[in-house]
Image (tube, helix red, strand yellow):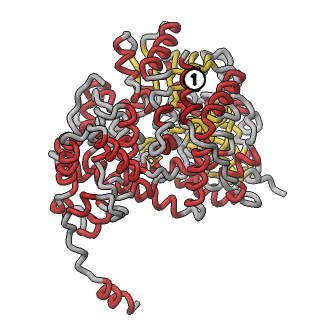
């Protein structure tokens, strides 16, 4: 069996063990800066709207995504009247014609604009990729400074079978390094940064 | 290896036949390198991050046996099936068998340099299975029947007009349209149809976490996710060196990878695949293919730390002016030149000589691999083993072709910029026989004294 021979060769050839570095020095104290988070997302080609109530989502979508017909909202409160019973279908293929999906993000990372999403909330893993446009709702209180803080504080253990950091819309620069948004995944990303009024 | 290739020097000469293209290639990659610098400079702890990444990888090399077992156990507990392949042939056989079990004839694959290394596509084609590469750059070179020329930017050697031609021929876009936006939209449509029809998806792996049995795949396009989440069977192929100990170590590597690769703060998608979705099969193929042997070579084992960011290629004056195909290996550039001789010392005897040993690669490498020193050490091994023949002379020939035409550069800017780009980190460390022989171009006309006089007034 190759397994045994590979493992034996590795055991024979691997160098002496060395200790792992301490990563605590990379941690930041305190919360992440929502303004910095916003700025990075914008440089990545995303759009950010600060909202203090979910009721603001509907008019913003009407204004900025006027062509969106088929809209899926993972929470009824984001967009009352969005499509229901969207989960049935052929392993996710049915979402190809979804114009816009509005999903919750667990938290964002200020240093790179990434938002953490898992299959626990979105149910269908392919949804944020296959939808033509994507919107993520994330609370401004849920911003961490760096990736180290993300893994140490928020996701030291995996929750769910799949998780993804999403930072901006799908893109490519494979043709002569010209940046084009909308490669295979969502063509645009809208982030609703939610800060409830005190 | 059954195929006989031309040596790097001759392939480089062919690439240099088209002067404007070489200049474009050179400048574009240098621009990517500069984007990397800008990003790195915004992170005050950048150097500490590189050091941490290198040390984590060092720990991995010393514990690889146990980490692989831990990964296997956890992946199995998550519901994945783990396969082990000693070499490329076994890897290909495992994948073929999985595809035959599913009865598929056509399926999608996202970027995986490992499957390039194993020549999976031609092998499957021989068995009547068509692989559709879904990374845009990879799809382009696939349509052109060429291998990728760069591990991160697979079709960096192609001009948009050629891509327009290819799309016209294969995807039916209008002749003469070479607009990147239009072509990308056409590819999106074409590949969406492939994602939808495909019941099996192959992906590569950027990092595999021993502690959790999960795999992280990074893309900007979203193609790995489109394939893997729609498929009934997801096959993830990875080299055994992709293991990292714990989830928290991802923080270090995800901060470094995209910044080093393209100067982005992070890739658009960093997907963590732990368990298959309901009703789906997840297969993980762990591939050795010479890695355990490299692990035993004290001078070269650090090459296994590589996270495939491509920064060493973007900065390399020889790579930029000789093109990825001149390395006649799945992985080009400085890192390819230290990995390839481990696979076949005779076949790749020329590659460690395709370098000025300027050290720029080692300076940008996010996991601090001593790339230029390993190149130098390979030269000694190859010479000792008697594989040099004309190689060394040919290497010099290539350097002359690639680097000794300052006239070529004048249009692209001043000589000073040429020196910067050509010798980004000149280390005159006595390792560099070529450097000693070269006549250096004249220093810039404006001396420091002139500059000081001019600027003092302000
Ligand atoms: S050797 Fe270093 S710089 Fe080159 S691709 Fe690998 S990680 Fe990146």
B310 on left or right of B275:
left
Q: Residue at x 69, y 45 (%)?
A: B248
The residue pinned by badge 1 equals B284
- Position of residue A34 relative to residue B141, above or below, is below
Subunit ID for the residue under disc 1: B
Tally the numbered discs: 1
Query: Residue B56's spot in the image, x, y percent?
Result: 61, 47
Residue B288 percent coordinates (x, y):
50, 27
Q: Position of residue B47 (x, y in %)?
A: 55, 60
Q: In the figure, A4 relative to A174: above or below?
A: above
Quadrant location, the C terminus of chain B: bottom left
User: Residue reaching furthest right?
Assistant: A198
Q: Is residue A166 left or right of residue B220?
A: right
Q: Give the SS element for disc 1.
A: strand
In the image, is residue B35 above or below residue A62? below
- Using the rendered view, name the quadrant where residue B235 is placed: top right
* Residue beneath the point at 19% across and 66% down: B439
> Outermost residue toward the bottom?
B457
Task: Tell me if I can see residue A157 in this picture.
Answer: yes
Say which residue appears at 75% left-offset and 58% top-offset.
Answer: A31
| Residue found 45% across the figure and 23% down from its top | B87
Closest to the observer, B63 or B4: B63
Q: Is residue B232 left or right of residue B22?
A: right
Mark 1 vs ligand 1: CB under 8 Å?
Answer: no
Q: Percent x, y for residue B414?
A: 24, 69
Q: What is the quadrant of the N terminus of chain B in the image?
A: top left
**Quadrant of the image occupied by residue B115:** top left
Compare residues B351 and B323 and report the one nearer the observer.
B351
- For residue B30, above or below residue A159: below
**Horizontal side, residue B314 vs residue B104: left or right:** left
């Amino acid at each position: 069996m190759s397994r045994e021979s590979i493992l034996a060769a590795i055991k024979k050839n691997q160098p002496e063990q060395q200790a792992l570095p301490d990563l605590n020095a990379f941690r930041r104290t305190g919360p992440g800066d929502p303004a910095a988070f916003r700025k990075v997302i914008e440089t990545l080609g995303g759009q950010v709207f600060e909202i203090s109530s979910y009721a603001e989502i509907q008019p913003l979508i009407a204004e900025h995504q006027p062509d969106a017909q088929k809209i899926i909202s993972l929470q009824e409160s984001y967009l009352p009247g969005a499509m229901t019973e969207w989960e049935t279908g052929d392993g996710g293929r049915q979402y190809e014609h979804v114009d816009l999906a509005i999903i919750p993000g667990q938290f964002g990372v200020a240093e790179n604009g990434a938002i953490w999403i898992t299959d626990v909330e979105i149910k269908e893993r392919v949804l944020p990729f296959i939808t033509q446009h994507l919107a993520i709702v994330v609370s401004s209180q849920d911003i961490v400074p760096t990736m180290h803080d993300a893994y140490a504080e928020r996701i030291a253990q995996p929750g769910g079978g799949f998780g993804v950091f999403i930072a901006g819309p799908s893109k490519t620069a494979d043709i002569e390094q010209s940046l084009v948004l909308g490669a295979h995944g969502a063509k645009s990303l809208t982030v609703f940064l939610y800060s409830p009024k005190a | 290896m059954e195929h006989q290739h031309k040596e790097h020097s001759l392939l480089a000469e062919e690439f240099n036949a088209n002067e404007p293209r070489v200049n474009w290639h050179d400048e574009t990659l240098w621009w990517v390198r500069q984007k990397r610098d800008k990003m790195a400079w915004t992170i005050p702890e950048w150097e500490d991050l590189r050091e941490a990444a290198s040390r984590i990888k060092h720990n991995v090399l010393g514990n690889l046996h146990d980490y692989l077992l831990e990964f296997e156990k956890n992946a199995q507990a998550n519901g994945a099936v783990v396969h082990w392949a000693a070499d490329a042939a076994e890897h290909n056989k495992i994948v073929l068998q999985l595809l035959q079990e599913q009865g598929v004839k056509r399926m999608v694959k996202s970027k995986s340099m490992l499957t390039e290394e194993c020549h999976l596509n031609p092998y499957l084609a021989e068995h009547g299975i068509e692989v559709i590469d879904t990374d845009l750059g990879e799809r382009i070179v696939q349509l052109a029947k060429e291998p990728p020329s760069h591990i991160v930017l697979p079709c960096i050697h192609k001009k948009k007009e050629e891509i327009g031609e290819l799309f016209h021929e294969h995807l039916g876009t209008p002749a003469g349209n070479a607009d990147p936006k239009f072509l990308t939209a056409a590819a999106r449509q074409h590949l969406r149809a492939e994602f939808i029809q495909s019941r099996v998806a192959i992906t590569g792996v950027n990092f595999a976490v021993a502690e959790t049995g999960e795999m992280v795949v990074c893309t900007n396009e979203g193609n790995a996710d489109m394939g893997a989440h729609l498929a009934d069977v997801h096959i993830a192929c990875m080299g055994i060196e992709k293991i990292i100990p714990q989830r928290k170590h991802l923080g270090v590597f995800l901060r470094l990878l995209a910044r080093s690769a393209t100067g982005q703060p992070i890739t658009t998608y960093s997907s963590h695949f732990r368990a298959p979705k309901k009703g789906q099969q997840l297969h993980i193929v762990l591939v050795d293919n010479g890695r355990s042997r490299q692990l035993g070579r004290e001078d070269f084992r650090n090459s296994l730390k590589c996270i495939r960011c491509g920064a060493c290629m973007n900065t390399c004056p020889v790579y930029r002016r000789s093109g990825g195909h001149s390395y006649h290996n799945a992985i080009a550039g400085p890192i390819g030149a230290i990995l390839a001789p481990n696979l076949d010392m005779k076949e790749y005897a020329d590659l460690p000589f395709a370098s000025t040993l300027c050290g720029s690669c080692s300076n940008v490498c996010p996991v601090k691999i001593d790339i230029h020193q390993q190149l130098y050490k390979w030269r000694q091994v190859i010479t000792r083993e008697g594989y040099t023949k004309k190689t060394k002379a040919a290497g010099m020939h290539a350097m002359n072709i690639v680097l000794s035409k300052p006239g070529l550069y004048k249009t692209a800017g001043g000589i000073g910029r040429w020196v910067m780009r050509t010798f980004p980190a000149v280390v005159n460390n006595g390792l560099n026989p070529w450097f000693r022989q070269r006549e250096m171009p004249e220093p810039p006309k404006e001396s420091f004294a002139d500059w000081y006089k001019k600027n003092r007034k302000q």
